[in-house]
Amino acid sequence: MKCMREHNAVDLVHDMAGNGYICSLTANRILESLFAHEEFLNFEGSDPEYIAKLCTGLASSSSQEAHLNRIEKSTPIILTNYLPKRYLHSLKVLLAALRANFIKPTDLITTIREATVFGATESELELLGTMIGKLELHDIYDVSQEYYLFVKHLVSNDLDGLIDDTDLFYYGSDLHRAHRELDRLITKKLLAWGVEATQEMLEEIVDGYDLEERMYSYFASQCEEEHPQPFALQTDDKADVDDLFQRDRMA
């Protein structure tokens, strides 16, 4: 059982069920056994994200009582350990614990602070934004500014990756329209992550961003796809042809 104490073990069980190697009932029993094993060990040395993944993996197949029981037991493991490198399921468990009143909104503050140090995926940002919203709903703004700066930094450094070309240039090669679309798409993205963008924030994010160059590259690549370059004779092929004509002249 020791070799199974990693969160990719949960993915393996789900993959086996999804590919028909085991039935869903067997998959659930395996996951239940893995969680029971962690309980037996009193969660000693347990990976918080692994425990959280077991909880979320069993959520749809368990009774409400069994699910909440696992959430209640898992939450202290998550809160008393450093946030792992990837932590999506840990956030899901903490939000479930908050809804069930197992924890207070202020219990989320350390988790959010750690996330702003480690970085986040888009899925993780959506849940972090939900947590920020829960805190602000209770007039708790301790980490709001830290989180806003964190998100602004992420977006500023990855506009190419976060904003899709087809969305950005949906209305064609009108640069002014593209600027408005960029602002709109950033605002929409930030809102999904719990950040209400101000005009000042938008200006700081796009400051120095070469939208014109991105537009040129996008439409140039589109043009190349629609009108590919004619076949060009490669160097080696040309040498073979020259050699062939040379032999013809000598014959």
Image (spheres, grey):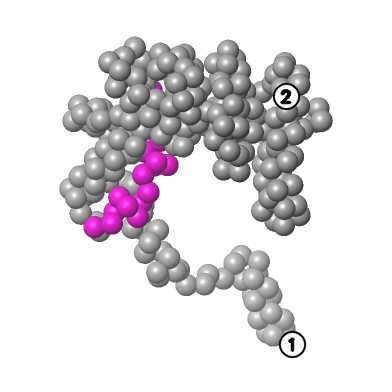
Q: Is residue 98 left or right of residue 239?
A: left
Residue 130, above or below 112:
below
Q: What amino acid type should be assigned to the residue bearing mark 2?
A: Glu
Q: Write down the quadrant of residue 56 in the picture.
A: top right
Residue 147 on the magenta segment: no
Q: Quadrant of the C terminus?
A: bottom right
Q: For the stretch drawn in magenta, what is the main secondary structure?
A: helix
- N-term mark: 2 or 1: 2
Give the mark count: 2
Q: Position of residue 168 (x, y in %)?
A: 30, 50
Question: In the rendered structure, which segment of residues is drawn in magenta?
Answer: 150-171
Q: Write down the quadrant of residue 28 in the picture.
A: top right
- Label for residue 199? none
Q: Position of residue 212 (x, y in %)?
A: 27, 46
Q: Nearer the viewer, residue 152 or 93?
A: 93
Q: Is residue 63 left or right of residue 201?
A: right
Residue hosting label 1: 251
Given this view, does label 2 or label 1 mark the residue nearer the observer?
2
- Regarding residue 157, the answer to whether it shows in the image is no
Q: Nearer the viewer, residue 74 or 187?
A: 74
Asked whether disc 2 touches disc 1, contact meaning CB atoms under 8 Å apart, the reply is: no
Within 10 Å of disc 2 (Cα), the crowding (few <14, some 14-19, many 20+) is some
Residue hosting label 2: 38
User: Which residue is painted at 25% across and 30% down in the image?
Assistant: 196
Residue 126, above or below 142:
below
Within 10 Å of disc 1 (Cα), the crowding (few <14, some 14-19, many 20+) is few
